[in-house]
Amino acid sequence: MTTLLTLQNETLGWGDTPVLTGVSLTVQAGERIALLGPSGVGKSTLLHAMFTRLADQRVALVPQEAGLVAQLSVFHNVWMGRLDDFGTARNLRTLVWPTTPEQAAVDAVLDRTGLSGLGRRRVSQLSGGQKQRVALARALLRGGDIVIADEPVSAVDPTQARHLLTELDCTFQSSIVALHDVHLARARASRVIGLRKGGIVFDAQAADLHEADIMSLYA
């Protein structure tokens, strides 16, 4: 099995402010990892650290705040997932006059995320759930070895959330996703990492976890 990244007894934070201490973990190709824990515990910090260690991989990133440009259309925000695949001239042309194949590629991922027909709409006109789906469509268009997503389905209903995570699973061999829905995490992940009070409380296969283990994160 291929090792994608390793953290060994590390302190993680922002600037000089530590958020997580004593962090040790290894991520293998093919794993579907869910991060659980209360708000502010450091899930975003851990995801950021993992993202920076994956520089030699093709990574699709879904940040918590979606990372969209509100003044641009849905099409252009989704196409940003492919910007680093092309030069400046090609990207400027696509901004003004996308080709039929480019349009079709974006339409395909919009269909998969329940946004059919919204390619020309400005992101500023969308609901919170629609913005999350635009960010997920951008990740699907980018593709790659692994997706890292921070609460990517928190603003959609449970049925949509299950569908969207399935779309990620169909596109990416590996995933690391922070979730607020405990039941969804246990159902979708092969491995669950629990965070509380500045560190990792448990790191276990989802099938081996007990309800009490997870509830201890939120006590």
Image: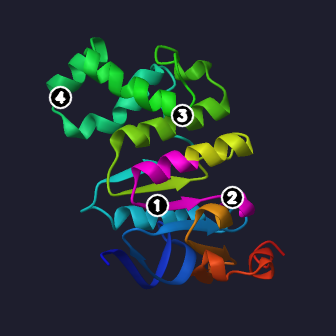
* Magenta-tinted stretch: 165-184
Question: Residue 120: x percent and y percent?
Answer: 47, 13
Q: What residue type is labelled 2?
A: Leu
- Tell me, yes or no, whether the two marked residues, 4 and 3, touch with CB atoms within 8 Å: no
Q: Which of marks 4 and 3 is in front?
A: 3
Q: Is label 3 in contact with label 1 (beta carbons under 8 Å)?
A: no
Amino acid type at mark 1: Ser
Using a 10 Å C-alpha cutoff, classify the residue at mark 3 as few (fewer than 14 neighbours), some (14 to 19) or many (20 or more).
many
Q: Which sits in the foreground, 121 or 107?
A: 107
Residue 153 visible from this viewpoint: no
Instruction: Tell me the CA gap for discs 2 and 1.
Output: 14 Å
Question: Which residue position holds label 2?
Answer: 184
186 with respect to 105 (left or right): right
Q: Which amino acid does label 3 sit on?
A: Thr
Residue receiving disc 4: 88
Q: Mark 3 points at which residue?
A: 113
Determine which of the numbered discs, if any, sits on residue 175 in the image: 1
> Is disc 4 placed on a helix, strand or loop?
helix
Circle 4 packing at 10 Å, graded few (<14), some (14-19), many (20+), is few
Q: Does the magenta stretch include residue 166?
A: yes
Say which label, 3 or 2, has the lower sequence index: 3
Q: Give how far apart the Cα atoms at labels 3 and 1 are.
A: 18 Å
| Dot placed on the residue nearer the N-terminal end, 4 or 2 | 4
Q: In which quarter of the image is residue 77?
A: top left
The disc, 2 or 1, on the residue closer to the chain's N-terminal end is 1
